[in-house]
Each structure stands twice: as C-alpha cells, then as structure tokens.
Image (cartoon, rainbow, N blue to C red):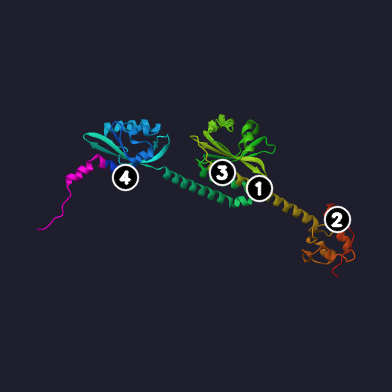
Amino acid sequence: MKSEKKKPSRTKSARLIESDGYLSAVLDTVGEGIITVDSSGSVVMVNREFENIWGYVRNEVIGQKLTALMPEKYRAAHAAGLERYIETRTPTVLGKRIELEGLKKDGTVFPLEIYISETGVGGELFFTAAVRDITDFKKAAEGLRDETILRKRNEVLLRLSQSDALEQGELDRMLLEITEADSSTLGVDRVNVWVYNDDRTKIHCIEHFELRDGSHSDGYELSASDYPVYFKTLENERIIAAHDAAHDPRTAEFADPYMKTHGITSMLDAPIRLKGRMIGLICHEHVGPARVWTPEDQNFAGSIADLISLTLEARERKRAEQLLRENEHKFRTLVENTYDYIYEASLDGKFIYLSSKHKDVLGYEPREFIGRSVFDLVHPEDAPAVMAEFQKIIETSVSGSAVYRYRHRD
C-alpha cells in the first residue's frame, strides 16, 4: 500500500494564525513600531518596538487618543483628516510612506516615517501603521547636506581667491564677481558693499547687487552718526547676525524706513578691515520670512569680507608700484640729463645703478659695473678713507662727503 505524506491540518493552522497570542508574538518580532487605532482615533494595539520608540508601555497608551502621541501642530489636522475619511472614504495618506513627527513620553519630538493601512474586522474600521524612527537617518542626511554645502562654499571662496581681478587689484570687477557669487551661494536677496569717506562721517555704497533681477548699482550714502550703535558694534565684532533685524538692538536703527521699504527681515553684516582698521562693510539683506543665520553662514560672510580686504590691499599695492615706477622714471630722466656722474649702491657697496655719464667720466659702459663693488675704481691710496666715510653714513644715516680719486679705463 502506497504511503502518502500527511498534510497539515488547515483547521490547526487557521486556529494558530487567528489566535491573539500568535499575532502578538509575530508583531513583537517586527523591527518597526506597529500601532492600530479604531475609527475614533483611539489606540487598540501596539507592539514591543512601539514601546521602544515612544517610551510608553502598552497599558499606558491602549485606549488613549492617537493625538497624544504627536506634537500639538499635527493634532487638529489629524482629527479633521480622520473625520473626513470616515465620511468620504477618500484616501489621502493610506498606502503611502510619509514623514511626520512623534512625541515621546519624555516630551522629545522626533522625526518618523509611517505607512498606514486600513482593516475592517466584524464591520468595524481599524487603521494600522508601521512606524520607523528616522532620527539617525535625518542626522546622517543633514550631515551629508552640511558637508556638501561647506564643500561648495569652499569651492566658491577658492575660485574667487584665484580671480585675476583680485591679483590685479581691480576692485570694481572683483566686487561684481564677489557679490554675485556671495548672493547666490547664501541665497540672499540683496548684498551691499560700503566704504567710509576720508573723515569717516559718511559711508558710501560702492556695490549693490539684487539677486532677483541680477542688477548692480551704487552711489547710495548714509551718515554714520545716524546709526551709532550699528557702527560701534561693527568696530568691535567679527559678524552681526541679526535674525530679527527690526528688533535686534544692533540693527534696529535701520528698521524704519529702510528695512520696511525693502521688506528686509534679517541682516548678516561683516566689517571690512584694511591694516587692522575698519574701512567699510559687506551687508547681506534677507527679504521674506525671518532667517536664522547658521555658524556656516556667518563664517562664509566673514570670508567674503576678507576677500574684499585682500582686493583693497592688492589695489593699494598696485597703486604704490605704479607711483614707484612713475617716480623712478622721473628720477632717471633727471639723472640722465645732468652733467654729473651719479650712481646708486647697496648697503654692502655694490653698484645698483650708474648714470650714462659713467662712460664719459671713467670710460666704462654703466652695465659693466652693475653688481661690482663701488671701491673697485677708487685709487688704492684713497680707498680706506672712502670706505670709512661709507661706513659712517650707514651707521649714522647722516649724509657725508669725501674727496677721492678714480682710476679711468686708460
């Protein structure tokens, strides 16, 4: 007789699956928080992971309203949404993974991801949700986002620092590059660069950029005496980060009418210093809902102010070089048109420059003695006295004179 494998009893399987103990055991092995509420929004079941997430034991939440487990800002919308669904059966969140916030027993608000499904049992409607605490995920995402933002900002600063305009000290062109990059990087509507006049009684806007239309302008003027608190603060602080600029005591002087006229709610300002002295500032003006300036925002604004300082230093250096060239040209012209033989020497007695009269006086081309000692042509008998006079002049920085003989080429 052929033996047959005995099939498990469907009745036994059904009894197991339908038993409360089996269902509870299964739910307690799930790695997500499970919560079921009835059509009135009252909690009827939670699993062990729910207890781990919210910090409650089951008896503390069974029979309570679901709204007790969520922050205040969600409660009215939840109650209205549940009532609307019961009446219309029009799903809005069922079958979708959505992000919300939960309220733990200790009062901590945390981010969560939730998936809600509907179940009908014995003619009664229930809603079951699978919930995950995504705090760590959010932190990791925010860290990655912050790292990306920081990298992009550093790239902007590097690009600006390598600009030809900065190297050449071309302030106008550099300010165009800086304000456009600054505004788009920080997402700020208005960026202004201001500098003091000579007596520091007024401050002039030398560059104003509007992000919304990409326009540049200048020429505005403010009296420093009208804003004493603001300018005194900038003299002593690296950054003014005014989240609520109209009520911040450091920037409130601009509230009426300046900020009201332009819709400015938040200001982020940094002083521009040259040789340790504040000579101007860069102002970031945010339009719209008040903005909280992060430490990264503030560091970026300070770095932008430093770039402007470097540009101003480069401009001064270029001007000094140009003035030196002009003075040197005047000097050379004067020297080459005199009847005297004139030379320049270093402190160690080496020729740096010899006028064209060198050839007329001594028979040598000037270029033949560049870098050679000035004493090479002095008569040996006169050399000690001449050397002593040179040393005296170097030590005392007082002009001197000497009479001595040269040896001509012949």
Give the mark, 2 or 3, whose residue is nearer the N terminus. 3
Give the mark, 4 or 1, whose residue is nearer the N terminus. 4
The residue depicted at 31 percent of the width and 42 percent of the height is: 28
Q: At numbered mark 3, what does the secondary structure look like: helix, strand or loop?
A: helix
The residue depicted at 49 percent of the width and 48 percent of the height is: 147
The residue identified by callout 4 is: 29
Q: Residues within 10 Å of mark 2 (few under 14, many from 20)?
A: some
The residue identified by callout 2 is: 392
The residue identified by callout 3 is: 299
> Tag 4: residue type?
Thr
Camera-nearest label, 3 or 4:
4
Q: Is residue 315 above or below residue 53?
A: below
Q: At numbered mark 2, what does the secondary structure look like: helix, strand or loop?
A: helix
Q: Is residue 253 visible?
A: yes
Q: Is residue 100 visible?
A: no
Quarter-wise, where is residue 98 in the image? Answer: top left
The residue identified by callout 1 is: 313
